Image (cartoon, grey):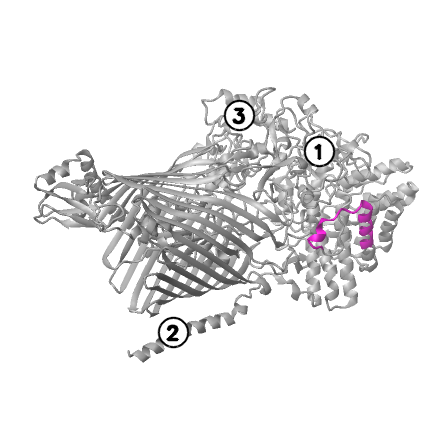
Amino acid sequence: MNQIDKIKQYIARPHLLVCALLIALVSCNDFLEKDPTTQISSPTFWKTQKDADMALAGVYSRLNVSTFNFNGVYSLAIMAGDANEGAASLGTSSTGSFAMGMMEAESGGLLANIYNQCYRGVASCNFFLANIEKVDMPESVRTIYKAEVQFLRGLFYFNLVDFYGGVPLYTTPVTIEEGTIAKSTKEQVYAQVLTDLDFAIANLPNTDYSGRGHAVRGSALTLKSRVMLNMSDWPGAAAAAKQVMDEGKFSLFNNYKTMFLAVGQSNNPEIMFSTKYLNPDNSSDQDIQLIWWGSWNPRAELRDAFECIDGLPIGTSPLYSPSNWKLNRDPRLKENIRAFTDPAIKASGAVVSIAWNAPSQTGLSPVKAGNVESLPIDYSTRSEQDWILIRYAEVLLNFAEATNEVQGPIAAVYEAINEVRARPGVDMPPLPAGLSKEQMRSRIWNERRVEFAFEGMRYRDIRRWKLAETYINTLIEPGTNIRRVFDPSKHYLFPFPLSEMDINPNLVQNPGY
Amino acid sequence: MDRFTVEKNQKPIMKKIFINKLWGKALILALYIGIQVLSPNLTVAMETNKLDIIVRGTVKDINALPLPGVIVVVQGSSVGTVTDGDGSYRVNAPENATLTFSFIGFVSQSISIGNRSVIDVVLEEDLKSLDEVVVVGFGTQKKANLTGSVATIGSEEIIKRPGTNVANLLQGKVAGLQVSSHSGKPGSENNTLRIRGLGTFSAAGSDPLVLINGIAGDMTTLDPNDVESISVLKDAASSAIYGARAANGVILITTKKGKAGEMTIDIHSNVQVQQATRLPNLLSNSADYMMYWNQGRERSGQAPYFTQTEIDAFRNNTNDPINYPNFDWIDHSFRTAVAHNQSINIGGGNEKTTFNVSLGYFDQPGITSVYDFKKLNSRVVIETQVKDWFKLGGDIQFVNQNIQRSNWDNGDVDFQVLAIYGAAPNYTPTRTLPNGSQGYVARYSSAIGEWTVRNPDAQNVSGVQTDIRYNVLPQLYAEIKPLKNLTWFTKGAINYNTMAFKNHEIPVDNYFFKDGSYAHNNATWQLGVRENWRTQMLSTFYSTLNYQKQFDGIHDVNILAGYNQEYNLDRSLGGTRIFFPTNELKELDAGAPLNQSTSGSSGEWAIQSLFMRAMYGFKGKYLFEANARYDGTSRIAADTRWGLFPSVSAGWRISQEPFLMQSTWMDNLKIRASWGQLGNQNIGLYPYQELLSTTSYPFSTNFPGAVMNRMVDPRLRWETTTMADIGFDLSIKEGLLNVTFDWYDKVTDDILFNIPIPASIGMTSPTVNFGKMRNRGIEIELGSTKQIGELTYNVSLNFSTYRNEVMNILAPIYGNFTVQEGLPFNSHFMTEWTGIFQNAQEIAEGPRHPFNPKPGDLKFKDQNEDGVINSLDRVVMDGAHPDFIYGSTINLAWRNFDINAFFQGVEGIKQSTQGLSWGLVPYIQGSPPPVDFINNMWTGEGSTNDHPAMYISGYGPVTGTRNSYWLLDASYLRLKNLALGYNVPRVIAQRIGLQNARIYVSGDNLLTFTKWPGSDPERAATNWFQAYPQISTYTMGLKVRL
């Protein structure tokens, strides 16, 4: 190799390097531009109606959480004194300890879940409402979508105000800086709930619900009547319920049992709003928890609240047999409660034993919404029962309760409550005529307790009726002499979670915590 | 099928032969050692037969100064002497023998006596120790010229302990490097490495960058026998060349290359006997167990589980262990395991081409359950000088790890160990069923509601979790020298990993102990098969240009510039099937499609960098260095993704100054100082992008949905660490004392952190540039090496301490841990526990406690004296960071024996154990209480203030409020290793056909001093108390060179 060649090489090699570097740097932008592969980039979203559809489904998907399914709702039955926690419990965040009065800001569990899950829902609603105007879509469709989302926001805020009282109120997406505001008053939150519901009532389609899965006008009206009961606005509650009754889109279903199981839920005229599940992608562990783990043990007090088939309470009915509590009872009892040792009977008639994972502390086990067809159950069992949040029986009982408060036990009150009692398959006799307003009130209260057993209504009701401290403090834990505790100076509201108090210095803790 | 059977059978046989041969040789060696130990004068006597001349002379250095203390040995014997004060010696030696003159710090010389009787020797100073070359970023450097803080560990030091996880072996070896091993689980030790403390509190942020031959990799996959050296780059000056990835320090691992010359074959083989280091002592008396459980339940307002008759039956029938057992599950479940490790390394080559091939195999059964680990390593290294200006080389690493775990093992949670701690003494693993067969026992009876603790034995037959990993790391490089002083080096590499994770679970019928009735089918998570496959590919390319020249013997110049790019792609694919026709079939295809599910994902990142380094040395005394790196990452938005990370450093070798050159005692003194900035890019893949997660909602059919889950701050900037370091290296009197000292100040700013936001915002927290934190500390390494007669000792001690302080943050964080300005990061934050309520009056008169306590419950301090114990009474507790960490190595060598002791410790760290602590909290899922608790619990007024009265898990007055009763001291000092080795004299080794041979016995984790109760303090870094125990290992090993 001669000198010149060598020199050439020396020159060429660094050149190569420089070229390599240049090529690499020029392609910088592409090389470093990496986008997520399993998520959608927000700036490119909110263009077409398809985007709006997806965003709407996203908001609805916030219902697939414990606050809006069997899990959190059954837990409320423990709080209400209708059930005890099953033996599965491990820690201080268990609902069983709350029911003993051990509710503290640091407790977590149910006390934090409702707060966190409702606000996740609120944020999704606000995000939707803030962006939906960007989408190119028919105005009529847009309005319905907005109405659905406002209905959901109303539902989320109603749960917040019901359990926590006044809470921070947001109706638009929040920045970090805006995230540490003081709470609004209870009245302000209720006002917001009604604003959202009124918009929904005005703009949602007036059709049946079942089979669509989207909120309809009846859903919003019924929720409004529930909200107004909470506010003791009896005429308002009665009017909203009456409107649903008059419009006639809903009616009682003829099977109290299958209404809570997937098999009875399609085109069901009674269901007015629910958290939807569908196998295999959107499933819950409802059957696992209800008829395997035994996470909830019904208490005898609830069992005893069911009347005998003659329409009399067990204390006065001659049909009641203390040695066999199942005999001659309101047919709804066996659809809610079984003895722990009772086998399950499948539709085929096959009798199968339930391999309970834990004994019942009360000797009773829950029935409602548990699908015995899925037995034997293990961890691969998926449940697809929709969890009913609003149904027509509530419309009738809301109407009865509110009307009784305003006008006393007029015929319309009797009609409404008797309609619920006379559901095909339940066929309980009508209430005796001539009840006083107070007598009617207590019959309505009991009717709500048994009709809506384990549906989360009772805990809301006994606080609304200011019955909680007088009732819960009388309860004694089975096998012990320990009394349950409901301290009226604090327990009417949950504490704000400690983590929330730590982050938001402007949030004032509820009294007593 | 036949072919497979044959192969399957061959493997163990071959292994056996392999081992037998080795151990046969070991036996021969052992005989020789025995002879030598029993008759130390035997060899001397044999040699003295030929003694006929006396040789004498003086030994001087090149300056003609006499050298006292030089060792003079007649080669191949143990005859020898030491030079006296004027350097003269006198020795008896046979004719034609060879004398070896050796002295620390000087090059040894061997001189054949011939027929001479006077031999004067001039020994040359051995500059090697100072000329020792250290691996640094993108090159090597003379240790003497280092201006940064770099610690190095050589191959011999690494394999002194018999472990196979390089991260474990680094523990306690380097000042400033803290290695915590989370458990002794085979193949899943899950070490945490921290260089100079917790550098940041970013989500993924404090792990050092580990480079294997320059390529990012996982050091736990390496075979320690392959390691040539490890450099730990601690300060900004040494690591700034890695810029955006170096904020937490860098660990450079170099593997062995072949050497020109005769081919060498090294074989290292050992057998390890392993046991649990520490296990908790839990109550194993059934009657007591049942009685205390009733007591605890009563305290919680729950009905008793056991009748007095039942309890009495256990108490009175101690001679009927079938029906009334007092079963010790811990004793039953842990065993002694035998592991072994084999490695062979073949190296050689000629002046142009060298190669090195190695193969390693490690087999470690677990000390409990179905745990098992097998690792196969192989590596091929080749390098060739194609032309005198062109060198090509490459290596390829292949690693296969087969990890087997209990099928409900779940990372740090260790459910299998939880099940062992949670099993009760009043039942046995199996019992005879009413039909006469044997069945697994679920628990004592159906009346007991603890439902998730499984019978550990039933769990063992319910299937396993396998985790099979392959790593292939090929790299190819070219080194071109276009000019004499210019080197152009280019390397490309692929680090390819596949991980196949599989759970196979089958039903196992379980029965109640009391009556043999059916309990459950043992399903824990999900029956059937769950599989997840993941591949990860990191491709790296870098190229450097290095100019190095010495001008006039005075000016040393070394300039390096380079380009680096990396791209990483992760993909995963998973599938689940539940229903299988038989328990033997365990591949997905065999299962039914009903309720099957699939999953899949991917993620990618890329980084591009330009970097340079300039070094200048003047007369080898004044040293300067500057580094800069310009990094761009895909993880930050285009506007802010590029960052510049500079560093400067300087060193002054005072010992080279004329006024110290003549010093007879000071060999080296260098003062170093450095400053620099580093980045941290481990911040999640797409933290700045506003993303919608996909979901679905079944209106009537399943409908796709999109939700916003996470807040985002698109203005993210680089997290930057600024570090200053001042240090010195001192060495005195040929190794009598070596000191390395460093002081550093490390400030991390713009720390990227998921700031806690109110839940009312309704989204998860965004990553933001949150705050600033400082670690300030010192590191000291002391060493001393000396030879006294035939005894050589080498003692070293490393000590490091740092103080962590949060300097400023957007907003303080209060939770179980608190982040506040002026405090160490994540300080323990809890209610202060002051004792035990002794009586009702004390409760009535004291501040109001949450959860309505009773006498015997925990008493807390009302810090703000407002009469109520609540969140306002939480205070900061110390112990979030260790006060100091330390390690010490003592090596003694006498003749051919050496002994090596290694201590390691952590002082001043505390860990909260509150929560789900099986083995500590009484009756959590039925877990027996610790004996220590039973002996010291409150039993009535005035009994104790140490432990509360018997309670059960979930009891609010004890477990409801986070408090310091649960804050335990996790400090420890551990004798990590004690090893005794014997180097077979070369002459003997050669007689059995070996170049050299060494046998050793060694013990790991032999002694532990700690206050931590129950399980192991070393694993305290997670919130779970129960853990797969650390392992004590007793090893016998053999190393030979053929």
| B502, above or below A31, in the image | above
What is the spatial separation of the Cα atoms under label 1 and label 2, in whole angstroms?
81 Å
**Left or right, A41 with reference to B345:** right
Residue B986 seen from this side: no
**From which residue to which does the magenta span run?**
A174-197
Which chain is indicated by disc 1? A
What is the spatial separation of the Cα atoms under label 3 and label 1, in whole angstroms?
29 Å
What is the spatial separation of the Cα atoms under label 2 and label 3, in whole angstroms?
78 Å
Q: Are marks 1 and 2 in contact (CB under 8 Å)?
A: no
Q: Quadrant of residue A58?
A: bottom right
Residue annotated with mark 1: A101
Q: Which mark is residue A13?
A: 2
| Percent x, y of residue B641 | 56, 62
Sequence order check, earlier mark of 1 and 2: 2
| B396, above or below B872, in the image | below
Q: Are marks 3 and 1 on the same chain?
A: no
Q: Secondary structure at mark 3?
A: helix
Q: Looking at this view, is A386 or B389 the one in front?
A: B389
Q: Label 2 sits on what residue type?
A: Arg
Q: Looking at this view, is A176 or A363 the one in front?
A: A176
What is the total number of numbered labels drawn onto the structure image? 3
| A472, above or below B14, in the image | above
Q: Is residue B19 magenta?
A: no
Residue annotated with mark 3: B934
Q: Looking at this view, is A237 or B1010 the one in front?
A: B1010
| A447, above or below A281, in the image | above
Residue sticking out furthest to the front: B659
**Left or right, B183 with reference to A34:** left
